[in-house]
Image: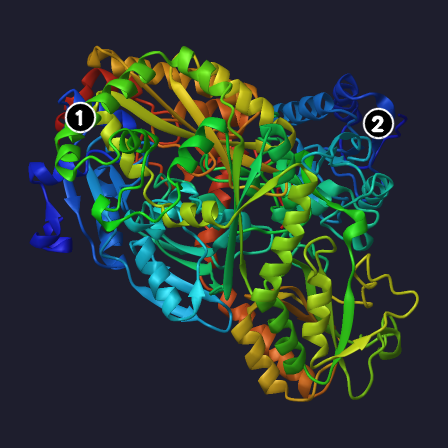
Amino acid sequence: MEAIVGAGAMSTALPDRIAYSADFWPKTQIWKQLGDIERFPPDCVVWPNSVAQVQAIVSFCNEAAVPIVPYGGGSGVCGGTIPIHGGVVLDMKRIRAMRSVDLESNTFEAEAGINGQHLEDHLNASGLTLGHFPSSIMCSTLGGWLATRSSGQFSSRYGKIEDMVQSLEVVMPDGSVMDTRHRTPGAPDWTQLFVGSEGTLGVITSAILKAHPMPEERRLRGWRFRQLKDALRAMRAVMQAGLRPMVLRLYDPFDSMIALSGQKPGPVSAASGGRAPSPLRGLWDGAVKGSTERISRLMAPLEKAVKRRALITALSAPPVVNRMTAHLPVSCLMIIGFEGQAAMTQSDMAAAARILVDHGGTDSGARPGEAWLAKRYSVGFKQTKMFELGAFVDTMEVATTWDRLNTLYEAVRAALTPHAFVMAHFSHAYREGCSIYFTFGAYRVDPKRAEQHYERCWEMATDAALSAGATLSHHHGVGLSKRSGMTREHGAMLKVGHALKHTLDPHNIMNPGKLLPDEDEATMQTLGPDASRQRAGL
Amino acid sequence: MSRTQPPGGPVSQLEATEAALCAIIPADQIETQYDMEQGPGGAWSIEPASEIELVELLRWANAKHAVVYTRRARRGDAAACGLRPRLYLRSRRMKRIVDIDIVSGTVTVQTGISMAELQRELEERGFSMGFPARPWRQEPLGAVLSAALDSHWGPRYGAMEEQVVALGVVLPDGTVAHSRAAPRKAVGPDFDRLFLGSRGRFGIVFQATLRLFAHTARSASTHGAPSLAAALSAARRVFELGADLRAVEILTAAPDRTWGRKRLGLSETLPVLLLVEPQGSPAGDAAELVEICINRTLTPLTAPAGWNVHEGLLPPPRAWTSPVVPASWRELVRLAEALGSDVPAGLWIVRMSRHGGHLSLADGVDGPAADTVRAFIEARQAELAVGRDLSKSLEADLKRRLDPKGILNPVSR
């Protein structure tokens, strides 16, 4: 490895190996809470800086039968980059050039390791936008987006990453390079067979994608609906009228309350450290109105303790809390936004407003939409606090056609209700259907049972979603967390997956154990944390 | 079914094969293939009427090393297959509309239905497909999905794949595989893409769920341009509006009488036609804005009687066999610059987006402008040929993996 990338671009140091042993999969957070911080460390980490180096590394690993895990930003939430078989983690972040921008054709070619926000900044400088804004944009890469079929928050207008990509450059497991832009008539669509393969078929090194002109204008508004069903019908009507909002999100009653709690009148002051006022803080602020700043500071730890106790109590009794939140007298919040040329944006927003009024919506003005836009990247960072409390929280983004959407929502809620506190929002709306983004959390006094409880929640939710005819993932991917669910979802179609894997990667070196069931899975579970150490050879 | 002794194979062997087929499929759905040389293995055209019959047939073919074609018989098939029995599948009995989901805007249908029949059924309910039915009027949907639609007759509403929400496929070993209908997914690669456009070599698509569009919300406008550059420039402005466009095409009059200048409403000074079909009302006021945007520089045309703009495509010019190549917008602009005010007859740029389009030129067109376009097409073809060997080799390996006995459309390419 040193001969290929140089001594400074590889590491076998334990801290590096630990850093690359997990992504943002909540289950790994549970492991960490239990003190298990090095369950699956790789044998080494390499940082190649060219496609030629990637080719050399892959060829070497292919000959030596060493597993390779391609790694982008490590922001995945499904365990897709966990090196369960050890081997080499191939961090692509140094292969990050913007190769070309074609302003006439609105396309560009970029290397896979480029950071999402940097990519968008590059395009913005040329007057273009990709239109892809996942909440992980600042800590994820283009290659990671492509490998997992990622989606941005503006997918209703711009589509998902698979809609944006024109072709790929892929280093194949034997070290050769494939350019998928040359599709022979009658040949399979290799681009779409590599997109979503999560590093199991090859290493994506660059891609040509479509871009769009920077929007001239952006308009956002919030709407309230008394009934969730009415709001869902309104969403469908907007999409099927041919309108293409950049964002169309609908929160269920409890999620609406959370979303609205950050939008109390008055700007967030600098003195508050940029924190938005929470409902609890609002109550507290009212109770101590007129108190001195000193008293407030003295009471802060108490407020924190009360919040902590309240949260733990709520998460310890999910059936009760779920029943209560189901009957909250709160209307559902919808955020709708359009962007593009001013005339078209105005006209589309007016057309959407007519549809929403027809379905019983009430206009709440621009503030809810603007507040959402301002905080759209900050959601994920709140999860760490939950784990610090000894609780766990996770998200599940399922999708289905409009006719099954309400059934899916009810089914997953019912399945999770006895086990975890659950709320949801509907986002990523399309002409044929929509995604539901469930957030669920629970607390176990005995931390050792947290992992078991977490798995139980996923099992119940997965069963419910599959039975309701949904796909298990709209944009997070499969990784380890949904591997068994993927097998059930695809059924016999998985034969194609196996055929692809065996054809392209006969030695099973590319991210082994992901997407498809692992042949020696039982062995791995027996070996557990020592698995990678027992795989000698590097 | 009745049969006489065909030239070639021993009667007893052929009779045994027929008897085996009759055990799977009712005899009235089997017909001995006499129109071409039958060969020693025998050849039959077979019309399975259900998924079960199709599955059983493929299992039998797999066990017996028979060859299954999803196309018509061709001269040379017998020689290519030797002693292996040949089965030519006809899908016309599998044409049931399984479900029209008006809530989600999808239709699930067996792929033996002809495009015209499907279009008629949908129109009766106020819907239409993303495919123009007219060019493939008699073709079954399965053939359209399995064919490589890189021709003029590709769908106008985005790529063919974008019209498909889910597929039902029978793999060569008789396994039935269904993909899940969802608007978008992130559960591994999109396995449907292996079957779309790959000419039935990896599996037989027997059922498809397609997107539907409201039949009443369609309107198209046509505009005359003095040059290709002017037409491209106007199209560019339309894309920049950000409207949801279903189709944008640029064409010139055909060299034969299928669509002459007069029929299109073109003239010496306005030789290029720009066709724009925005998503109709109530999608904002897209149609009106598009009209305003184009009419700043181009001349609006009135679609002449007999030309069904809503159906979309014109009848194909005779002997139009030229290749269609994808071209980026930059390449199209360069071509327009090279052509100047001169444009050849029979030029067609279809499936246009803000990123480019697919371009072709009719056969039998002469002159310097035609030579320029032809040279452009050849250059694009040469560029696209680079790196094909790896793709072909992987494709062959994948075929061997999924169809080790090579029973499904083995020599269809």
- What x and y, as percent, mark residue B411? 63, 46
Report helix, strand or loop for mark 1.
Answer: helix
Q: Looking at the picture, how far across and down is residue B201, in whole percent?
A: 60, 41
User: Disc number at residue A499?
Assistant: none
Please tell me which residue lies in front, A94 or A402: A402
Q: Give the position of the C terminus of chain A as an image quadrant.
A: top left
Q: Nearer the viewer, residue B41 or A27?
A: A27
Which mark, residue A32?
A: 1
**Residue B158 shows in the view:** no
Picture layout, residue B197 above or below residue B308: above
In front: label 1 or label 2 = 1
Which one is nearer the viewer's eye here, A199 or A455?
A455
Q: Chain of mark 1?
A: A
Where is A22 relative to A517, above or below? Answer: below
Question: Does any portion of residue B136 appear in the rendered image?
Answer: yes
CA gap, disc 1 to disc 2?
65 Å
- In screen coordinates, is A462 left or right of B363? left
Residue holding disc 2: B29
* B81 relative to A443 in the view: left or right: right
Whether discs 1 and 2 lie on one chain: the answer is no
